[in-house]
Amino acid sequence: MSEPLLPPLRTLWVYLGASPLLWLLLTLAAYLAAVRVQQRLGGSPFANPVLLAVALLVAVLVGTGTPYPRYFEGAQFVHFLLGTATVALAVPLRLQWQKVRERLGSALLTLLAGNVVGALLVVGVLRVFDAPISLIATAAPRGVTAPVAMAVAQQLGGLPALTAVLVIASGVIGALIATPLLNALRIDDWPARGLAVGMAAHGIGTARAFQVNAVAGTFAGMAMACSTVITASLLPLLAPWLLS
């Protein structure tokens, strides 16, 4: 089997790859390049920067034969900033607090119903196909941000690594289809659009919502945060019934 790179290039890559800073720089460069591509395409939701950046980084890792643990060693600073970015959502929430307060009651009821029904649908579909209990436990929390979803999946007896994949996939798919779908349904209320995107596509969808409209992004961030609390609180309580 041929080497992933030609010998001279491979030698150079081994030298560069020993620096953790390389992977952090490549991660940032991949995302900036993906953002530029989306801008060149007129902001098309189908050119999602996260999807494009992931595809580019996977190509680099496969092409260079770099194992994921080595990549994560350098790029983990980005992972560390996920918590900071989540907390930073409080800033637009404060700026749009008047609009949020006007719809807070109805929004919370919507999020409660949406998260419960979403989990029930996932479990129901997998039950129809006679999926194993471990797979149901893995997929049930896929509607919230990855760290919480992985923790809930582990608590239910699922596979946290697969849960993370499902979370990212649902976020990317939601970010891709949310705007065209909501436009086709003629839903032009920005708070409603934000709630739908944040609940269905969590962090990636929230980032997309902020690109479209500040109000939609604020409500998407609120939906993501509230959905996380609802799922982490209710799903373990419902698990004995859902997984029995």
Image (cartoon, helix red, strand yellow):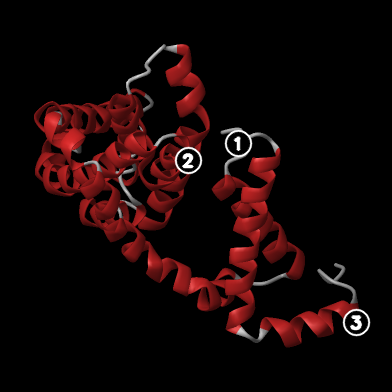
**232 vs 130: above or below:** below
Mark 2 is on which residue type? Gln
Element type at mark 3: helix
> Alpha carbon of mark 3 to alpha carbon of mark 1: how far?
39 Å
Mark 1 is on which residue type? Gly
- In this rendering, the label closer to the viewer, 2 or 3: 2
Label 2, residues with CA under 10 Å away: few <14, some 14-19, many ≥20: few
Residue 218 at x, y percent in the picture:
30, 41
- Is the C-beta separation of discs 3 and 1 under 8 Å? no
Residue 217 at x, y percent in the picture:
36, 40
Element type at mark 2: helix
Residue 157 or residue 85, whichever sits in front? 85
Q: Which residue is mark 3?
A: 8
The answer to whether residue 146 is visible is yes
Residue 138 at x, y percent in the picture:
33, 46
Q: Which mark is residue 43?
A: 1
Label 3, residues with CA under 10 Å away: few <14, some 14-19, many ≥20: few
Which residue corresponds to the image point at 81% horizontal and 83% vertical from the top-left? 12
- In this rendering, the label closer to the viewer, 3 or 1: 1
- Is the C-beta separation of discs 2 and 3 under 8 Å? no
Taking the image as shown, residue 189 lies to the left or right of residue 66, namely: left
Which residue corresponds to the image point at 13% horizontal and 26% vertical from the top-left? 106
Residue 175 at x, y percent in the picture:
47, 36
Taking the image as shown, residue 114 lies to the left or right of residue 189, namely: left
Which residue corresponds to the image point at 90% horizontal and 74% vertical from the top-left? 6
Q: Quadrant of the N terminus?
A: bottom right
- Is the C-beta separation of discs 2 and 1 under 8 Å? yes
Q: Quadrant of the C terminus?
A: top left
Q: Which residue is mark 2?
A: 211
